Amino acid sequence: MFKKKHVLLVILIIATLAVSSLTFAQEPVTVTIFVGLGTGTSPEQIPPQEALQERFNSTHDDIQIEFLIVPNESAHDQLTTMIAGDNAPDLVGPNGVSTIAKFLDNWADITPFIEADQFDTSDFYPLALELNAYPDLNTGLPLGLFPSYIYYNVDLFDASGVDYPPSDFDDTSWTYDAVRERAMLLTLDSNGNNASSPDFNADDIVQWGYDDSWASTRELLAPWGFEGVGRPTNEDYTVAMANNEAWVQGLQWYSDGIHVDHFIPGVDGQAAMASAGIGTPLDGGLVGMFHSHTWYLTELGFDGLLFEVQIAPVPFNPAGGRVAPIHADNFTIPENSKHKEEAWEVMKWLTAPEQIVDVCLIYGCIPSRQSVSDEFRAALEENFPGLDYDVIFESINYLDAPNHESWVPQWGRAEDTINFAGNLIVTGENTDAQAVLDEANETIQGLLDEYWANQ
């Protein structure tokens, strides 16, 4: 009798342990999503991210997500510490192309996941798939795109009697020469003389025709027709090409626009606008045209504007092509994440047609899936009525690839070198584009040689 009870007790214990083990095995995996390197940290973005978290968690038993939102100013250091301490988050984002480049060695390649799932990428804009993919590394599925175009102040055009920029992408008359011509007519001194007038006073400018002051130097130059587009090297990153003919031409156009033709505000003009309390280049009503991205829609704040704004394509370059620099966001999986497979499932969910519109409305980007363009366009029309939305979506087809923020060896130092060259032009310390880009090219070549010598 005792033996039978003993046997039954052992069976009961084993069964209990088995059930406990099964329960433990079925505990959901928590995927931590690190937010802070880009957008996503402003107070108004936190509640919708919390709602997104609840939406996922309420529909999944095996995986739960948790947003870790870190202030921008400390996010870089905190992520670096987490990765170094073997405590990496499982997803990081939304990341721009530059953030991908800064941490390039830390990302997992999602190619094996795509292949294992036979995941269909055909719904994504084709060029969007290339933005954060390198020869041996695909950092993540495209989430959102921020195409660029020309914002223009309709009222200033009307007041000066200047023709609006064309919205037709096939209109080859819209070139950088045409931008210069219109911009000079829109640039006024305090007596109302425009920059084309012999009576124009360049020391007393009260209105400028064109601005691109929020762009990095690589972004300024990407549209000008270099075969490497936004990359300052050759294809295998061994030869510096920052002083290529197209970039020199573009930077000299910009230099002359500031210091010779005066239709672009230099440091003095930017300071004057800042002292007048103008928050963004266009919203003070002192700039006729401003080249920027879709994220500028929220920066501009349409509700409080006292003038009409419309948009037009980036112009054709001298080579007869058009390049509209783009910003792009995605989520990435750190190489030392402990939950890569689960993170991949979350990445797919965030970029799926059922969620991507809501995700992009949080982060202000155009969804990278073509199938939801009508749905997102309707949201844009509600928030920013009256714009030529065809310009926004058509501009995606002219994005810069290689991108102006893409990785090159010693990315940070190379970026600083290019931006220093651009700053020499803006300040007027050196207005010779060939000279400043020759010097930048020499420095970048040294960085490349140093990098490859250590590989």
Image (spheres, grey):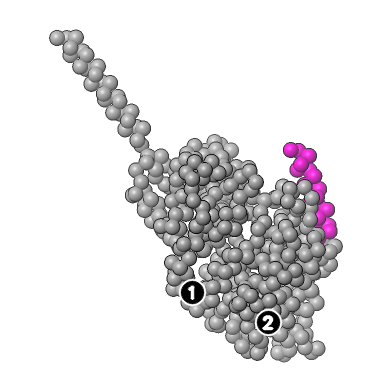
Q: Which mark is residue 207?
A: 2
Residue, disc 1 = 384
Type of the residue with mark 1: Phe
Residue 431 x/y as whole percent: 82, 68
Residue 378 x/y as whole percent: 44, 71
Q: Which mark is residue 373?
A: none
276 or 138: which is nearer to us? 138
Q: Comparing marks 2 and 1, which lies closer to the viewer?
A: 1
- Image quadrant in which the N terminus is located: top left
Residue 175 x/y as whole percent: 71, 75
Q: Name the side, left or right, on which 113 lies relative to 164.
A: left
Is residue 104 at least partly visible in the picture? yes
Type of the residue with mark 2: Gln
Q: Which residues lie in the magenta part?
A: 437-455
Q: Is residue 447 part of the magenta span, yes or no?
A: yes
SS at circle 2:
strand
Per the model, the C-alpha gap separating discs 2 and 1 is: 25 Å
What's the residue at 57%, 63% (across, down)? 146
Residue 17 x/y as whole percent: 30, 24
Rendered view: 78 above or below 15:
below
Counting residues from the start of the chain, the first of labels 2 and 1 encountered is 2
Q: Residue furthest left?
A: 1
What's the residue at 53%, 41% (across, down)? 112
Q: How many marks?
A: 2
- Please identify the dominant SS of the magenta region: helix
Circle 1 Cα neighbour tier, 10 Å, few/some/many (<14 / 14–19 / ≥20): some
Q: Name the side, left or right, on which 378 lies relative to 274.
A: left
SS at circle 1:
loop
